[in-house]
Image (cartoon, rainbow, N blue to C red):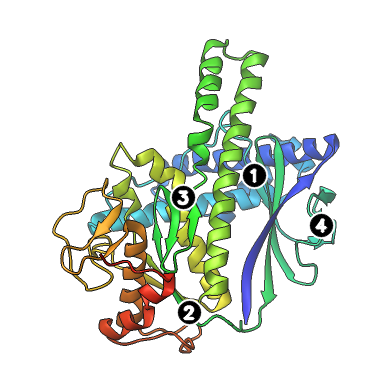
């Protein structure tokens, strides 16, 4: 089957190439802001909004007289920016419809102008793009060296290339269409995953993944840099230096989070036929101001997103357990449900059978049990995953074999 994938890696640019990328990013940002202003003006007079093609034709006519500097960059940069503007409008109107139906309670997200002061931004190119082992050839930019060699497939069909900047580093994301064989999954086991703050993930087999807490570890340095920036004069070079230091620090935080998320999700989809996670309401969890920062630092939404697409590529069956399922309050041994369980109780003690178990481990076992006994365990291609059980709770608990799994008695 054919799949569309993206490969993102860093670029090693010289000063001339860096300047050319800045010009393309500026042209893309200018075209987006010009198209947004023009759309508003046309809508006020005619009551209709111009399409991306109409805006691009109008912009091409203005290049000859008003914007001759746009001939120095590839025509794809402003063209794709106007297409992004059209997508932003469609997304806005879609959210308006959801708001009318009562299915959306957040912001509508009307398109806003892009500011150079916030970020340099990015630009997308199409057309004649060639990928080599150590470089990539882009329109009007030529050969750009890749920091990581032999990462992007050279035999796949290239659809587009997006060049972006983050904290002084330039990256390219190549979107390709490649033929992928039907994956053969050797794993035959099911696993339950309980995401948390103290430990990023606790698995039902006893494995834990530590939470790097990237923001917490650099918070002291981040506060010092923010105070330093506030005390320096606006527009000065020293303030710009401090702003770059803050940007590099935020980029490091983001990289650490992504690294931990990729390691966890790859391990789960590679070694297990069924992965059960809880359908967490992250937006609701962020309303608790005591835990909001820690929840954001744990990257729950990104973990779920990665599990969804990696499970499809590897043929793993991903099961989302209802968010109201009492995984933490339920005893994994007998099924007794506690009426109350506070957050500071980190050890689960069953009042019925006397089971004593770590709170997160107990929840992950319950998630696994709920998944294998309530869902038809088929993989992404409609085939039943070998070795994955599908039956009643009692026989599922017998299959888990909790006491035998850890080699110790967990009952008192």
Whole-number angstrom distance, CA of label 4 to CA of label 2: 35 Å
Per the rendering, the mark at residue 173 is none
Between marks 1 and 2 in the image, the one whose residue lies nearer the viewer: 2
Foreground of the two, 126 or 262: 262
Whole-number angstrom distance, CA of label 3 to CA of label 1: 24 Å
Mark 3 residue crowding within 10 angstroms, few (<14) / some (14–19) / many (20+): many
For disc 3, the marked residue is 299
For disc 1, the marked residue is 122
Please tell me whether mark 2 sits on a helix, a strand or a loop: loop
For disc 4, the marked residue is 149
Q: Residue at x 30, y 58 (%)?
A: 98
Vertical placement of residue 85 versus 277, above or below:
above
Marks 3 and 1, the one that precedes in the sequence: 1
Marks 1 and 4, the one that precedes in the sequence: 1
Vertical placement of residue 236 versus 136, above or below:
above
Q: Are marks 3 and 2 in contact (CB under 8 Å)?
A: no
Please tell me whether mark 4 sits on a helix, a strand or a loop: loop
Examine the image and state in which quarter residue 29 appears.
top right
- Percent x, y of residue 199: 44, 51
For disc 2, the marked residue is 189
Quarter occupied by the N terminus: bottom right
Whole-number angstrom distance, CA of label 3 to CA of label 2: 26 Å
Q: Residue at x 28, y 41 (%)?
A: 288
Is residue 278 visible in the rendered structure shown here?
no
Q: Are marks 3 and 1 in contact (CB under 8 Å)?
A: no
Between marks 3 and 2 in the image, the one whose residue lies nearer the viewer: 2
Mark 2 residue crowding within 10 angstroms, few (<14) / some (14–19) / many (20+): some
């Amino acid at each position: 089957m054919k799949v569309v994938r993206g490969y993102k890696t860093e670029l090693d640019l010289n000063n001339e190439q860096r300047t050319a990328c800045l010009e393309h990013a500026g042209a893309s940002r200018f075209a987006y802001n010009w198209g947004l202003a023009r759309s508003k003006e046309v809508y006020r007079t005619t009551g209709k909004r111009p399409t991306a093609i109409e805006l691009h034709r109008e912009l091409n006519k203005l290049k000859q007289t008003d914007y001759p500097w746009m001939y120095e960059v590839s025509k794809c940069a402003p063209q794709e920016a106007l297409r992004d503007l059209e997508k932003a409008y469609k997304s806005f109107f879609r959210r308006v419809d959801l708001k009318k139906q009562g299915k959306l309670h957040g912001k509508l997200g009307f398109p806003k102008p892009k500011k150079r002061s916030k970020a340099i931004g990015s630009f997308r190119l199409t057309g004649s793009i060639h990928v080599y082992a150590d470089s990539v050839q882009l329109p009007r930019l030529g050969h750009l060296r890749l920091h990581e060699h032999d990462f992007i497939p050279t035999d796949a069909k290239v659809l587009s290339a997006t060049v972006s900047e983050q904290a002084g580093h330039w990256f390219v994301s190549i979107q390709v269409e490649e033929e992928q064989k039907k994956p053969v999954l050797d794993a035959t086991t099911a696993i339950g995953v309980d995401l948390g703050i103290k430990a990023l993930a606790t698995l039902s087999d006893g494995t834990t993944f530590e939470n790097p807490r990237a923001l917490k570890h650099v918070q002291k340095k981040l506060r010092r840099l923010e105070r330093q920036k506030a005390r320096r004069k606006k527009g000065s070079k020293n303030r710009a230096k401090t702003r770059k230091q803050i940007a590099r620090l935020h980029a490091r935080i983001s990289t650490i989070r992504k690294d931990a998320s990729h390691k966890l999700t790859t391990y789960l989809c590679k070694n297990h036929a069924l992965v059960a996670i809880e359908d967490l309401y992250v937006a609701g969890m962020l309303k608790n101001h005591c835990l909001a920062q820690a929840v954001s630092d744990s990257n729950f939404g990104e973990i779920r997103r990665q599990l969804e697409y990696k499970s499809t590529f590897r043929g793993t069956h991903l099961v989302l357990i209802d968010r109201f399922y009492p995984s933490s309050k339920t005893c994994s041994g007998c099924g007794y449900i506690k009426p109350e369980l506070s957050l500071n109780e980190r050890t689960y003690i069953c009042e019925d059978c006397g089971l004593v178990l770590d709170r997160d481990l107990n929840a992950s076992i319950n998630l696994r049990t709920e998944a294998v006994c309530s869902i038809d365990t088929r993989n992404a291609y409609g085939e039943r995953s070998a070795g994955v059980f599908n039956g009643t709770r009692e026989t599922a608990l017998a299959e888990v074999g909790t006491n035998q799994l850890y080699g110790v008695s967990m009952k008192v």
